[in-house]
Amino acid sequence: MAAKGFVDELFHAVDMIAEAPMRWPKFHKDTRRYVFPRYPFSVIYRIKKDVIEVLAIAHHKKRPGYWSAR
């Protein structure tokens, strides 16, 4: 089922980001981006002190950059 695969990938992304948030490349201003290996999505996040703040689960083609005003 595609939905389960996507959710599994999302949980994996969150685990990977939590494990080493600085590992993923800088993206836009003060954000970083984790790109899903199997789906056209990215987790856009920023690090504020000891907190990882997820700004968007962004599709690569639909409304790119919509999250940047957040």
Image: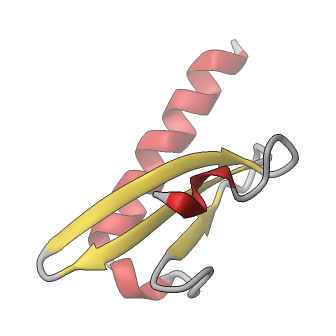
Residue sitting at x 76%, y 47% = 38
- Residue at the top extreme, as displayed: 1
Left or right: 64 as drawn, with respect to 26: right
Residue 25 vertical position relative to residue 37 in the rendered view, above or below: below
Front one among 22 and 19: 22
Q: Does 57 appear above or below 26?
A: above
User: Measured from the top left, where is residue 55 in percent x and y?
Assistant: 44, 55
Residue 4, position as x, y percentages in the image: 57, 19
| Residue 60 sits above or below residue 69 on the image | above
Q: Which quadrant does the C terminus fall into?
A: bottom left
- Name the residue at the right extreme: 61
Q: Determine the residue positioned at 33% across, 79% down.
A: 20
Q: Nearer the viewer, residue 56 or 36?
A: 56
Answer above or below: position of 48 versus 9: below
Q: Is residue 70 left or right of residue 37?
A: left
Residue found 41% across the figure and 64% down from its top? 16
Q: Quadrant of the N terminus?
A: top right
Count up the numbered dots.
0
Measured as percent of width and height from the top left, residue 49 is found at: 14, 82
Q: Residue at x 58, y 86 (%)?
A: 25
